[in-house]
Amino acid sequence: QDVIADLVFRPLLGAEDLSVERRMVLEEISMVEDTPDDLVFELHNEALWGQHPYGYSILGTRDTVSALGVRELRELHERAYHPPQLIVAAAGNVQHDRLLDALERTGWAAVDRGDATPLSAPTPVAAAPDYRHVAKEAAQTHIVYGSPMMAHGHPLRYAAVLVSTVLGAGMSSRLFQRVREELGLAYSVYTFQSFHADTGVHGVYVGTAPETAADAAAAIREELSRVAADGLTPEEVESGKSQLKGQSTLSLESVSSRMYRAAGVDLYGEPYRTLDQLLAEIDAITEEQVRTVCRDYFSPGAQTVVSLGPKAI
């Protein structure tokens, strides 16, 4: 705990260390640029969110990283790294009182409380649905369909995850069976979603040969249209519930997953749910909720589409 406390509250932030770390981050940026299936998501975020921070690369740009100095790092550290802005989460063989004692020994109570005014950010406003192609010589064309979704605290969040699961999570999903197994158009095709405090995003990724990219994109649009128009069958809803409950239960076998789950409860200001409560919420998803999610979020016409590869789709 002493070492972690020193790293968090009393980092040296020396110029020489910054110089080394800057080179590492610049190498990471180059690595992303050389990894098309990572880069296409960066490009999609930019296309969807524009100049909002959600549209920025987490790594930054070469210009922003190169411009950072010790002064800027110290200003950020003094603004953000003090107890009112931090959450301590622990999981495993933990005794609460002993954890509190350990925090006291590290000087938690003595750390300067700092400015606890929440950092502000503009309200995210997504761009109108559009198609953007970025030319890049590569063996594959990488395509992302995506659009805004509900925030983390929305009552339909679990229904949205269920729809995404049935559509594109795993080998039994609609997209895997249609695009890969039936048509043989791609090796990798899947859905994704992220939920933030004020909004969310979801979509579909596919990586395919340039000559089959247009066919793969058409197959995805067809599946999205079917989902938006017809929803899911009762059998698919029940299958999706079983899959979600299994994933939720298995995730608790990981100590780190339990720790992140505990942190998320406080970060999002939510009540803690036991596993039984979580499974009950999944069981309570109705077919009407599923239809609402399908209709409101999965229409192909509502998606921002970005492709990365030798030619447009």
Image: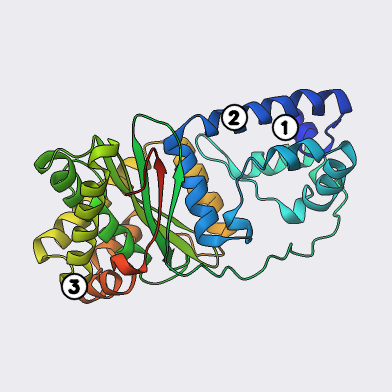
| Chain-order first, disc 1 or disc 2 | 1
C-alpha distance separating marks 1 and 2 = 30 Å
Image x and y of residue 20, in percent: 77, 23
- Residue 4 tag number: 1
Q: Which residue is mark 2?
A: 30
Kind of residue indicated by mark 1 = Ile
Mark 2 secondary-structure assignment: helix
Residue 105 is left or right of residue 151, and the answer is: right
At label 3, counting other C-alpha atoms closer than 10 Å, the crowd grade (few under 14, some 14-19, many 20 or more) is some
At label 1, counting other C-alpha atoms closer than 10 Å, the crowd grade (few under 14, some 14-19, many 20 or more) is few
Residue sitting nearer the eye, 133 or 253: 133
Q: Residue at x 43, y 32 (%)?
A: 137
| Chain-order first, disc 3 or disc 2 | 2
Q: Residue at x 28, y 62 (%)?
A: 282
Q: Which residue is mark 3?
A: 229
Image x and y of residue 212, in percent: 22, 41
Quarter of the figure with residue 303: bottom left
| Chain-order first, disc 3 or disc 1 | 1
Q: Residue at x 80, y 61 (%)?
A: 116
Q: Which quadrant is home to the N terminus?
A: top right
Quarter of the figure with residue 293: bottom left
Mark 3 against mark 2, which lies toward the viewer? Answer: 2
Residue 307, above or below 297: above
Residue sitting nearer the eye, 145 or 58: 145
Residue 274 is left or right of residue 241, and the answer is: right
Residue sitting nearer the eye, 241 or 100: 241
Mark 3 against mark 1, which lies toward the viewer? Answer: 3
C-alpha distance separating marks 3 and 2 = 42 Å
Mark 1 against mark 2, which lies toward the viewer? Answer: 2
C-alpha distance separating marks 3 and 1 = 52 Å
Kind of residue indicated by mark 3 = Ala
